[in-house]
Amino acid sequence: MKPSQTIRILDAAANRAAEGLRVVEDFVRFVLDDAHLTHQTKNLRHELAKACSTLPLVDRHTSRETSRDVGTTITTAAESQRTDAWDVCAASLERTKQSLRSLEEYSKIDSPKLSAKFEALRYQLYTLERCLSIAQESHSRLSDCPLCILIDAQNSSESFQNLITELLRAGVGMIQLREKNLPDDLLLKRARLLQSIIPRQNNRPLIIINDRPDIAALVDADGVHLGQDDMSVKDARAILGLQKLIGVSTHSIQQARTAVLDGANYLGAGPTFPSSTKSFDAFPGLDFLKQLADEIRLPTFAIGGIHAENLEQVLATGISRVAVSGAVSAKPSMTVKRLLGLLNGSAEEPSAPAGG
């Protein structure tokens, strides 16, 4: 192969990769509106430009034969069809991956060191693609879940079942079983009871098990919620499989950024206020929620001491999902309906508490 032919290939691949990344960045910036992932995409694009700058620009320009390129007139029907903005982004991610591979392979001829740089950029793109795909899927699956109710095992299976029934009547979209004091066999029984009570239909509430991906897997729950001291998202995914939701508790913006890159489906953020069910040494508070709302678009549930009277403060930060526990202990159905009304933009009180 002549040197001019190699340069021509590298020039074409570099152009495709840069163009593809710009399209991806436009989606992340203007559609997803995610500052964190926009920063990741922009850095990747700048690193690509830096690597390509080692290819003499005048040689790249001189080698071009666009008007005589046989590939410019070859197209397929699929190339001119896109269903929505995400479809455009996904196609550009694929285009960029292929271009980086071409850059990696053909740069081996003259510069193995440069080839290794393109390989590293390709791996970075894989991570970015995963984050974007998970964010897109998570928004879709959690679109009807502005409220997550955290429940414990209750004093008996009867009271546990009554609580679940009330929550179902109130229309809650997500129930998380959070119980740290039960032996494994009793926790498993409660999780199975929860799964048996909730009907198997498309619009049923999502079932999340706190801390225990093994229990979540045994009862075929919809997912697991992990704390900072629990196993990693990667290990939980190995237990639960690819289709389950994995949430991660975060208490700082750096923890949230890490959870996104680790592949979490959603975030828990807090504690926001002092809680009646859990004690904390520090409270990231409303400022943390504002940070998250400004930077990260992965579905996020504010948690910690939230109730109807302070919910407006939470919503003012830009976070539109909450997780509550103690707030629903007295009158579950009435409280859930009130919270859902506020979260959905209506401050109207429910006419009567369903279920008594």
Image (cartoon, rainbow, N blue to C red):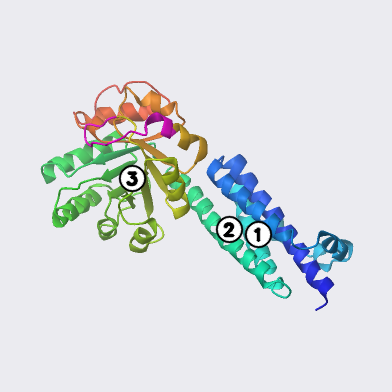
Callout 3 amino acid: Arg
Task: Report the mark closest to the observer, 1 or 2.
Answer: 2
Relative height, residue 228 to residue 293 (above, below) = below
Q: Quick one: label 3 or label 1, which is nearer the N terminus?
A: 1
Rendered-image quadrant of the C terminus: top left
Q: Residues within 10 Å of mark 2 (few under 14, many from 20)?
A: many
Rendered-image quadrant of the N terminus: bottom right
Residue 287 colored magenta? yes
Q: Is residue 75 visible?
A: no
Residue 165 colored magenta? no
Residue matched to label 2: 125
Residue at coordinates 42% horizontally, 44% vertically from top-left? 142
Task: Please give the range of residues in magenta.
Answer: 274-289
Residue matched to label 3: 204
Residue at coordinates 57% horizontally, 49% vertically from top-left? 40
Q: Are marks 1 and 2 in contact (CB under 8 Å)?
A: yes
Q: Quick one: label 1 or label 2, which is nearer the N terminus?
A: 1
Relative height, residue 97 to residue 5 (above, below) = above
Callout 2 amino acid: Leu
In the drawing, does residue 259 fall left or right of residue 43? left
Q: CA distance from mark 3 to mark 2?
A: 35 Å
Residue 124 percent coordinates (x, y): 56, 59
Residue 159 percent coordinates (x, y): 13, 40
In the drawing, does residue 206 fall left or right of residue 19? left
Q: Residues within 10 Å of mark 1 (few under 14, many from 20)?
A: many
Residue matched to label 1: 96
Residue 261 percent coordinates (x, y): 48, 52
Residue 184 percent coordinates (x, y): 16, 56
